[in-house]
Image: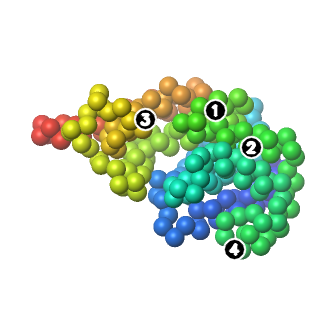
Amino acid sequence: MTDSSESDLESVRAIAKSYFDDHEHPFPAHDWHHVQRVETLAERLAADRSVDDRVLGLAVLLHDIGRGKEDVGEIDDHAAWGAEEARRILSGSNTVGNSEGDRNRTTDLEVTDATIDAVAHCIRAHRYSNDVEPTTPEARLLSDADNLDALGAIGIARVFSYGGEAGTAIHDPAVPIERDDSRAGATSVNHIYKKILELPDRMYTDEGRALAADRKRAVVDFVDRLEAEVAGER
C-alpha cells in the first residue's frame, strides 16, 4: 500500500473501533477482537493473491460496525446498514464515528468512488443469512475470513457467548435438531448444527476450505462429546 493508503486505513481503524467502544455493555461474540481476528485471517487468505488490499482492509475494519445496533434492536440488518454507513465514512463526512470525539472530527480520506462501491459490496455481502452473493475477490475473502472465525474453538466460544447474550438455552433434549424448525436453531447446540457446521460449504477459496475443514473437525468433536455428556455416557 502507499503511505496515503496506510494513513487512510489507520484513520478508518480508529473510527471503526469507536462503534464498538461506545456500547455500555459490549457483545463479546461480535466485538472489536472479532474484527482483529478477521483481519488476520483475511491477510492470510489474501497472501500471494491478486486482490485490492486497500478495499479488503477497509471492508474488514468496517464490516461489523452495525452489529451492535442490530443486537439491541435498533436496525434489522447490520450488513445493509453497515454498507451505507461505510459509504458515509469513506466519503469524508464530518460527522463520522460512533464516539463523541470521532463525531466531531472531519475526515480527510483519499478514497475513490470505485473503492467506496467495492467496500460497500464486501460489507453488504459478508453476512451469512442475507443471501447476497459476493462477486469480487475482496468480498469472497472477507466472507471466508468472517466465516472461519465462526468455526473451530473460537467459533464454539462465540456461539455460547452469543447464546448467553440472547438468553438461548445451551441444549434442550426436548428440541432435538430433527424437530427444530427454527431458522437459526432454538438452542446453541442446534445453532451449531443448523449454521456453523454448514459454513465450510460456503467457502470460496482453497485455503479457506482447508482451514474450514480443520476447524469443522474441532466443532464436530466438541458436539459429539457434549451430546455424550448430556446422555450420561461420558
From the top left corner, tell me how far across and down residue 155 is, in percent: 43, 44
Q: Are marks 4 and 3 in contact (CB under 8 Å)?
A: no
Left/right of residue 125 with respect to residue 226 in the rendered view: right
Q: Quick one: SS at disc 2? A: helix
Q: Check disc 3 and report the residue beneath it.
A: 183
Residue type, numbered disc 2:
Val
Q: Which residue is situated farthest in the left direction here?
A: 232
Left/right of residue 142 with respect to residue 158 in the rendered view: right
Left/right of residue 64 with respect to residue 84 in the rendered view: left
Which residue is drawn at the image coordinates 38% and 35% (left, top)?
Answer: 182
Numbered badge on residue 119: 2
- Closer to the chain start, of discs 3 and 1, is 1
Q: Are marks 3 and 1 in contact (CB under 8 Å)?
A: no
Q: Compute the Cα span from label 1 to label 4.
A: 33 Å
From the top left corner, tell me how far across and down residue 189 is, in percent: 32, 40
Q: Quick one: SS at disc 1? A: loop
Q: Quick one: SS at disc 4? A: helix
Q: Compute the Cα span from label 3 to label 2.
A: 29 Å
Q: Quadrant of residue 41?
A: top right
From the top left corner, tell me how far across and down residue 168 is, in percent: 34, 50
